[in-house]
Image (cartoon, rainbow, N blue to C red):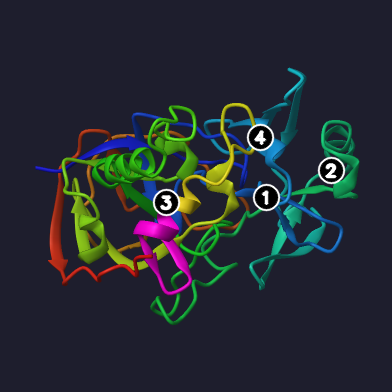
Amino acid sequence: MPRLASLHLYPVKSMYRLSPPSAELQPWGLTGDRRWMLVAADGTALTQRDEPSIGQFRPVPSADGTSLTLTGPDGSVHTLAAPTLAAGAPETTVSVFGTVFSAAGAAKETSAWLAERLPAKLGEVRLVHLDRPATSRPINPEYAAPGETVSMADGFPLLLTTTGSLNELNARIADDHPGDPVKGAPLPMERFRPNLVVSGTAAWAEDGWRRIRIGGLEFRVVKPCGRCVVTTTDQESGERRGPEPLRALGRHHRFGNKLVFGQNLVPVRGSAAGAGAGFGASALSGDEVAEVLGTLTVGDPVEVLEQAQAPEPDRR
């Protein structure tokens, strides 16, 4: 049976990951996932697409979500309280891929600390906190029911990938670079920055999934994930590493103009919940209503409840 092989969350969008053995699930994603974000002076999200070294900052929220500690690439440490609109933090208009919503702005001292450690080309950089994820940012209604929201993730509460698909992709990369152990080297799953990694499936099986259960929790599989330049970035060094995996996805797993790896999920409210506390179990703030759907744990069984015929990719 397929199993949940690993869990990952990213407290600050595009910064380094945390990989706990278990994590609580809320309707808008894993508790503590992408609740913070860097923005430019105009409020637009700043990510590894703009500057790969953002991924070298290591964020750790406090267990109750009321503070955040950042460790910079130079080893320096900065801790700040989580700003909330209810407590009078400045309301900041921000955007992710054109979706505009409000967040609470962090103190100027944090902006100054970040400015000393990020390239000057980024200009003014601010850190913001999404303290009201239950109401702040609706999911694209084409893929969601009324009232369903998302954190500061690109578009959906969770991203799922499978080890079977990564193994197949790495085999194709090796085939495309015969005799070149550098260009044909296998890529780690971290390049794709998933939340949930599933093992024990055939390659690309997830392309046909429509509804799944992990442990006691159910999810709608709503949309394949089109990949970008972030996948070419070494998440350990912050360096761009050339055309892979985008080149291989373009040759072997392209749908129209989308280079696809992984599937976006939306949690189903009302599904049975497992017991136990995960990372950041009470990371709630402001007037947010605590709504925890359950806990996901590495090793949980994965069951496909509904599936369709997986589409055939456009091959070159």
Residue identifier under label 3: 248
Q: Do the residues bearing badges 4 and 2 touch, measured as CB atoms within 8 Å?
A: no
What is the x, y in percent for residue 124?
A: 89, 50
Residue type marked 2: Ala
Q: Residues within 10 Å of mark 3 (few under 14, many from 20)?
A: many
Q: Do the residues bearing badges 1 and 4 touch, measured as CB atoms within 8 Å?
A: no
Magenta stretch? 249-261
* Marks 1 and 4, how far apart at CA: 21 Å
Mark earlier in primary sequence (1, 4): 1
Which image quarter holds the C terminus?
bottom left
Q: Give residue 67's mark.
A: 4
Residue type marked 4: Ser
- Between 228 and 294, the residue placed more toward the observer is 228
Q: Give residue 107's mark.
A: 2
Q: Horizontal placement of 211 versus 141: left or right?
A: left
* Marks 4 and 2, how far apart at CA: 12 Å
Tag 1 secondary structure: loop
Q: Is residue 250 magenta?
A: yes
Residue identifier under label 1: 47
* Marks 1 and 2, how far apart at CA: 20 Å
* Marks 1 and 3, how far apart at CA: 23 Å
- Between 193 and 290, the residue placed more toward the observer is 193
Q: Residue at the location (68% across, 41% down)?
A: 52
Tag 4 secondary structure: strand
